[in-house]
Amino acid sequence: MGKALIIGAGGVSSVVIHKCCQNPEIFEEICIASRTIEKCDAIKNKLSGSRTKIHTAQLDADNTDMVIDLIKSFGPDIVINVALPYQDLSIMDACLATGIHYVDTANYEPPETPKFEYKWQWAYREKFEKAGITALLGSGFDPGVTGVFCAYAQKHYFDEIHSIDIVDANAGDHGYPFATNFNPEINIREITANGRYFENGEWVETEPLSIKKIYDLPEIGPKNIYLLYHEELESLAVNIKGIKKIRFWMTFSDNYLNHLRVLENVGMTSIQPIVYEEQQIIPLQFLKAILPDPASLGPRTKGKTNIGCIMKGIKDGKPKTYYVYNVCVHEECYKEVGSQAISYTTGVPAMIGAMLILKGIWKKPGVFNVEEFDPDPFMEALNKYGLPWQEDFSPVLLD
Ligand code: NDP
């Protein structure tokens, strides 16, 4: 059916590529392009028997002209951006210049300020509309599946959703004293920022990790969950009509938080450059270089993740509650595609988003978040491609 240019060759990219190769009728040909071509070649070599034809290319995606040249020489129908959020705008510019559809899993963030927001990418709406191409933003798990879960609940179960609590739990153990499950720089920037949630039309700001609760998660058990700001809150607050309150919660072990606190206290999570032996270094980037590569956690990680949305609202004038979630097993992900569940739960939805655009089901000129499309084909594809979901109509609510 089509050709995809996949940018980035990290943990998430590897899963996207494995999933595209499991679906060769849709993804007939792909090109893996990233900063370090050896990483692209290593993924290609793992999939040597695939029916999907695989090419690789060296690419600095910060350089729009280079992305344009590669798009022109490879001729994809779609670009799947699974590099870093810093590259979103340069890649979107290249898609506009060449008239190619765009998918990503994380919203733009300027490298010098840890402040991810949709405003930069939403500003492209008119340009994509005029160019007649689709940009699908945040088609990972969270953001991504969480938005589809909300749109599905809105379509099938509620007249109005009043509150949404997104709970992201990882009960996996990789055996290292400290490691992050996806890009450490992006992960630590997210966690050390202030928390924020939406209530009655306003954003309430909280100190980092200052609100904690215990929630008993299906198949995982009771866990400490901490309130964080997360990017889907921004788009869901706009796209779920009548919403009064949305919060995002993530599990962290005491051990993880102790390490993080020490690293923060000694300045290792700072993004302010320092000069060391006449070289300018950014402590957080140096920390990323010495921490385990998330892509290497696959064979070591055991246990489950559970990510879902707990909702409260009304249907036919009566109060209604609904919880929809996916449980994913790290070892099973590794057996299937050679990656742990965090990369898996992000890579599968990125492939599904791209597939729905290629099939014309989610193709619409403009820039969209996942919850703006019909959730049903995405929900069906989650069951088919490895992320089955479960429902509970009387969940315990978070107060
Ligand atoms: P990794 O750090 O493992 O991989 C990032 C890849 O991008 C690397 O191969 C890196 O190259 C490449 N890259 C970085 N800069 C450039 C550049 N300028 N040009 C070309 N390639 C570049 O990250 P992950 O795979 O863990 O995460 C990928 C994305 O997925 C991130 O944006 C992350 O925020 C997002 N994500 C989304 C989630 C969701 O649920 N929505 C959950 C988890 C992640 P090199 O190898 O040379 O460094």
Image (cartoon, grey):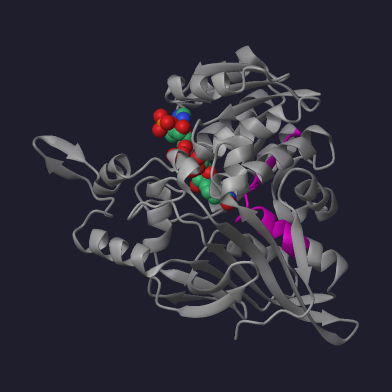
Residue at x-position 50% and y-position 19%: 41
The answer to which of 2 and 60 lies nearer the viewer is 2
Please, which residue is most extreme toward the left here?
277
Provide residue 82's location: percent of width, then percent of height. Answer: 55, 37
At a point 30% along the width and 39% down the height, the residue shown is 289
Is residue 31 placed above or below 204 in the rendered structure? Answer: above
Q: Residue lying farthest right?
A: 316
Q: Residue at x 46, y 48 (%)?
A: 109
Compared to 150, does 16 lie above or below?
A: above
Does the stretch in magenta take in 40? no
Q: Quadrant of residue 397?
A: bottom right
**Quarter of the image that includes the N terminus:** top right
Vertical placement of 68 versus 220: above or below? above
391 or 195: nearer the viewer: 391
> Is 15 left, or right, of 9 in this rendering?
right
Residue 183 horizontal side relative to residue 198, left or right: left
Residue 283 pos. (x, y %): 24, 47
**Residue farthest to the top?**
73
Q: Is residue 184 above or below residue 323?
A: above
Question: Could one spot residue 101 in this view of the protein?
Answer: no
Q: Is residue 49 left or right of residue 188?
A: right
Q: Residue at x 46, y 56 (%)?
A: 173
* Count of number-bearing discs: 0
Q: Position of residue 145 (x, y in %)?
A: 68, 55
Q: Is 218 on the left or on the right of 251, as rendered?
A: right
Magenta-span inclusion, residue 146: yes
Quarter of the image with the C terminus in it: bottom right
- The magenta-colored residue range is 132-151
**Is residue 200 among what the camera can see?**
yes
